[in-house]
Amino acid sequence: MIGDSDKLLRQANDIIGQVFLIAAFFIMTGVPLAILILGIFNFIRALTRRGTIVLQGLTAIGIWIFLTYVIVMILIVIIFSLPYPLSPADEIKSNLVFIIGFVIYTAAGLALIYWTKVQAKLSRPTTSAPNAIPPPASP
């Protein structure tokens, strides 16, 4: 009876781990695509500050590459430094490490996407621009 519950818990743990790995794959591919697409839209819409938009997009992609490298290396080190899971509690700990790592990674990715989206608001021309044509005077 106890062996069956341990086997069931391990299978559930494996399914949870696989779901999070698939979600992590989509996050890892979705963040740079979103940054790239938003950067292109910002660049097309902007009348000024195009250089700033390009620099921000390259910086966001660079930060994303660095975060991806760090998260993957941390997870590899943690997984290989942990002892072989001898109990279901050890397997739950390894899944929690993955979950916490990818929650942090997702939050950082969403912050980078938000930063890119904010660039669109900053690059829109204002009505008080120095080169703006003033409205006609009323008689």
Image (cartoon, helix red, strand yellow):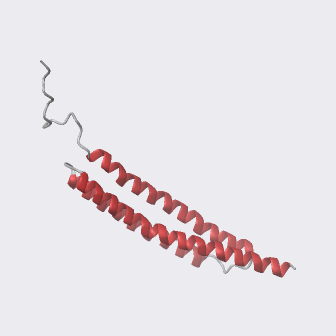
Q: Can you see residue 70?
A: no
Tell me which corner region of the image, top left, top right, bottom left or bottom right, holds residue 35: bottom left
Does residue 7 lie above or below 66 as drawn? below
Q: Residue at x 42, y 64 (%)?
A: 31
Q: Nearer the viewer, residue 13 or 130?
A: 130
Q: Is residue 7 left or right of residue 97?
A: right
Does residue 139 lie above or below 17 as drawn? above
Q: Is residue 128 left or right of residue 5?
A: left
> Where is residue 66 shown, x and y percent of the image?
39, 66
Query: Which residue is at the far top?
Result: 139
Q: Is residue 137 left or right of residue 118?
A: left
Q: Nearer the viewer, residue 116 or 136?
A: 136
Q: Residue at x 54, y 65 (%)?
A: 101
Tell me which corner region of the image, top left, top right, bottom left or bottom right, holds residue 127: top left
Query: Which residue is at the far right?
Result: 1
Does residue 32 lie above or below 115 as drawn? below
- Please identify the quadrant where the N terminus is shown: bottom right
Q: Residue at x 82, y 80 (%)?
A: 4
> Where is residue 27 shown, x and y percent of the image?
47, 66
> Where is residue 54 shown, x and y percent of the image?
25, 58
Tell me which corner region of the image, top left, top right, bottom left or bottom right, holds residue 75: bottom right
Does residue 135 lie above or below 94 as drawn? above
> Where is residue 129 shown, x and y percent of the image?
18, 36
Q: Can you see residue 19?
A: yes
The image shows a total of numbered marks equal to 0
- Please identify the quadrant where the C terminus is shown: top left
